[in-house]
Amino acid sequence: MVISLSANDIRAVANWPFLIEALRQGHRLARADIGDTFVHARGNTMLVRSAWIDGLAAGVKAATVVPQNAKRSLPSIHAQIMLFDDEMGALSALVDGTEVTAWKTAADSALGCDLLAPKDVDTFLMIGAGAMAEPLIRAHLSVRPCISNILLWNRTTAKAHDLATRLADLPQSVAVVDDLIDAIPQADIISCATMSAEPVLAGAKVTPGTHVDLVGAYRADMREADDDLHRAGRWFVDSYDTTLDHIGEFTIPVQAGVIQREAVQGDLHELVAGNAGRGHEDEITVFKNGGGAHLDIMVASALVEEFRTRSDVSESGADA
């Protein structure tokens, strides 16, 4: 039986600790065989991302990224995920990929934060106020509940204020900042999720011990961190296969000779296994969230299993 999960179905069973743990456990399995296709038109991107995780599932996510949709008050990302049975290869589930993308992306960054950021942190800076900003903040708070101050910066200040309104339920102090350069040194954790093709994060302003989470750049012409951060930071990625050769965050400074490809110290498999990580408390750690269908498969599989379990319990109760 093919299970179909809508966005509402996903929201009914999803929470940050559950999905972050699903990614942690997924990275204890064999490395996925990954294949990605990217096509472009008028500044828009279509991604067809596929992966097979031996022992879990195979899957495909097809997604469109249309940045101009923000001006139309529409989602920038539309996506659908197909899961296939690991043993027989039969279609097992259809899952709303747009909803999964937000949960997966933020959980990916939060897992990187949990594995790399100092345990005792106070101030979180969110650069960018787009669709991913709120889930990134909430996911990070789930792994670092000691955070007491949240700073928001966006090129369009009004959008940062809109984000602050959506975060009004949080017990933390939430403030919109006008000057990014002044805000950067105040932060213990910085998350950056923009559509920028030019660096927005000044590495010279990042203080020792800070953890930096880079989410936005996904094309070869896009980057969020400047050369100073590449030189100062200890770099990690969620997946070598989806970041090093595809995203400008690495390809641009590598081609310019600023860093070597080997500067990346580890991926999530190595971080989860304890074979890589923060070297000392004053180190600046940088985690590049590149995504990938293997992460969608981990998250979607966990959601499908949880949905199936709750449905079975509900049916058992009805029978009783």
Image (cartoon, rainbow, N blue to C red):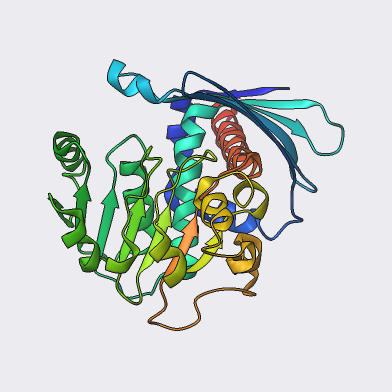
Image coordinates of residue 79 in percent, x first then y, are 54, 24
As displayed, is residue 202 above or below residue 206? above
Tally the marks.
Answer: 0
| The N terminus sits in image quarter | top right
Image coordinates of residue 109 in percent, x first then y, are 46, 53
Q: Is residue 253 left or right of residue 168?
A: right
Image coordinates of residue 110 in percent, x first then y, are 44, 56
As displayed, is residue 231 above or below residue 177? below
The residue located at (54%, 47%) in the rendering is 290
The residue located at (21%, 40%) in the rendering is 155
Image coordinates of residue 214 in percent, x first then y, are 43, 53
The residue located at (75%, 31%) in the rendering is 84
Residue 233 in view, yes or no: no
Q: Between residues 115 and 253, which one lies in front from this camera angle?
A: 253
As displayed, is residue 245 above or below residue 204? above
Q: Quadrant of residue 296?
A: top right
The residue located at (17%, 55%) in the rendering is 171
Q: Between residues 264 and 113, which one lies in front from this camera angle?
A: 264
Q: Report the residue that reaches farthest toward the right.
A: 88
Q: Between residues 203 and 216, which one lies in front from this camera angle?
A: 203
